Amino acid sequence: AVKMQNWVVFGLPNDNLSVENGIIMDNSRRWPLCIDPQRQANKYIKNMGKKVPEGMDTCKLSDAQFLRTMELGVQFGKWILLENIGEELDPALEPILQQQKIKDGSSWVLKLGDKTVTYADSFRLLMTTTLP
């Protein structure tokens, strides 16, 4: 109940559907995709991201530095909000979406394109779309 009250403080609407979606986002093992025609989830995620110690970055698939933003997010454990995604995602995201982590000594790494990036456990990918 306290967690749900915090979500409302961060801007999540207090209706049953929004609370159920908050629970799914909080407990899912995969990266959540929020169908967000009114952009409420976007606002909520950005407000939550302000409290993340590692920080949060926001990007779109059309951004020139999109892959660099993803790489730094994985490496430094940031939250990444990928906004306004369409029906198709960049194939370069597959290792992140599939969570294809590889054990390397005492840490985990992820291959992104031709780079091997250290994987920080605090990394989170959140995606939103306005498509129905």
Image (tube, rainbow, N blue to C red):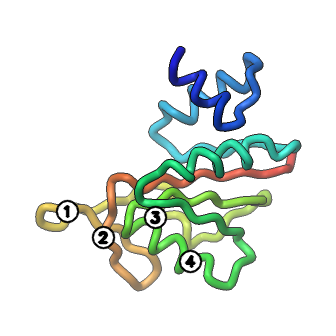
For numbered disc 1, what is the local secondary structure?
strand
Mark 3 / mark 4, whichever is N-terminal:
4
Mark 2 / mark 3, whichever is N-terminal:
3
Residue type, numbered disc 1: Ser
Q: Residue 80 bears which disc, if any?
A: none
Above or below, 21 against 96 in this view is above
Classify 10 Å Cα crowding around label 3: few (below 14), some (14-19), many (20 and above). some
Nearer to the camera, 8 or 107 = 8
| Disc 1 to disc 2: CB gap under 8 Å | yes
Estimate the spatial distance between the alpha carbons at disc 3 and disc 1, rounded to whole Å: 17 Å
Residue 78 picture location, percent across and down: 46, 61
- Point 39% across, 60% down: residue: 77
Mark 1 / mark 2, whichever is N-terminal:
1
Above or below, 44 against 91 in this view is above
Residue 107 picture location, percent across and down: 19, 62
- Point 59% across, 51% down: residue: 126
For numbered disc 2, what is the local secondary structure?
strand
Classify 10 Å Cα crowding around label 1: few (below 14), some (14-19), many (20 and above). few
In the picture of the structure, the residue carrying the numbered disc 2 is 118
- Point 62% across, 76% down: residue: 66
In the picture of the structure, the residue carrying the numbered disc 4 is 67
Estimate the spatial distance between the alpha carbons at disc 1 and disc 4, rounded to whole Å: 22 Å
Residue 80 picture location, percent across and down: 56, 60
In the picture of the structure, the residue carrying the numbered disc 1 is 107
| In-image side of 127 versus 38 (left or right) | left
Nearer to the camera, 12 or 28 = 12
Nearer to the camera, 51 or 73 = 51
| Quarter of the figure with the C terminus | top right
Frontmost of labels 3 and 1 is 1
In the picture of the structure, the residue carrying the numbered disc 3 is 95
Task: Work out which residue is located at the far left of the displayed protein and give it.
Answer: 105
Mark 3 / mark 1, whichever is N-terminal:
3
